[in-house]
Amino acid sequence: MEEIIFVNKKEYLIKKLLGHGKGGYSYLVKQNEDFFVLKQIHHEPCDYYTFGNKIEAEQNDYYRLADAGINIPRMLDIDIPNERIVKEYIEGPTVFELIKDDVFDEKYLEQVRKMAAKATAAKINIDYFPTNFIVRNEILYYVDYECNDYMEKWDFEHWGIKYWSKTPEFIEYMNSQK
């Protein structure tokens, strides 16, 4: 996959696709000897979510999350016309992988609950799905910038918790990915 992509005239080498969500594609990219995440916004339809201006929303959500004190990767560059964002690369397993491989530690549940309390205090919800969380050096990071105005039915205890163990919802999702 090693192709070149530019962000504000800076060249990055795409190493691999990290993930594809409802807002974009995230790639592991390299510049010199350093690794980053490059998110390319896409405009594919999503049955259950309505978008406005995605790149502006990502930028605004980044600042909302940072102001709330949520552990997130730093935004290093944003190319609004080409709808690309360069983020700090947080290396480590996702919470999804930890649960799937039966090596999930309860301390991460404590950490996400602290994040959820910060989000609630800031009147926002984050996307608590476990693929959006990475553990590095035993610290949990929310690696998506998506957040929405707070609604109780979408907070951690009412929605997110359903995916933070091998519940039927988790297993159904895991099976759908095969």
Image: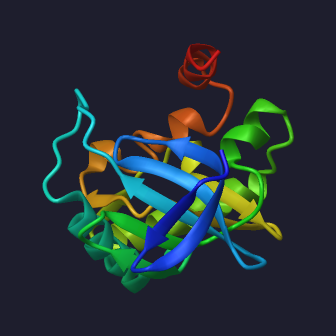
Q: What is the count of numbered marks?
A: 0
In this view of the protein, can residue 168 be seen by the observer? yes
Rendered view: 122 above or below 3: below
- Asked if residue 105 is positioned above or below residue 39 in the image, the reply reads above
Residue 72 appears in the figure: no
Up-down relation of residue 40 to residue 168 (above or below): below
Q: Nearer the viewer, residue 52 or 81?
A: 81
Q: Which residue lies at the image location 73% right of the left edge and 79% below the top edge?
A: 32
Left or right for 64, reference 91 = left
What colour scheme was applied to this rendering of the protein? rainbow
Residue 32's place in the image compared with 41, above or below, is below
For residue 173, side relative to residue 57 (left or right) = right
**Residue under the point 43% across and 73% down:** 7
Q: In terms of depth relative to the viewer, which is nearer, 173 or 125?
A: 173
Measured as percent of width and height from the top left, residue 129 is found at 51, 43
Residue depicted at 33% across the width and 45% down the height:
154
Image quadrant in which the C terminus is located = top right
Which of the 4 image quarters holds residue 170? top right
The quadrant of the image that shows the N terminus is top right
The location of residue 63, given as percent across then percent down, is 34, 81
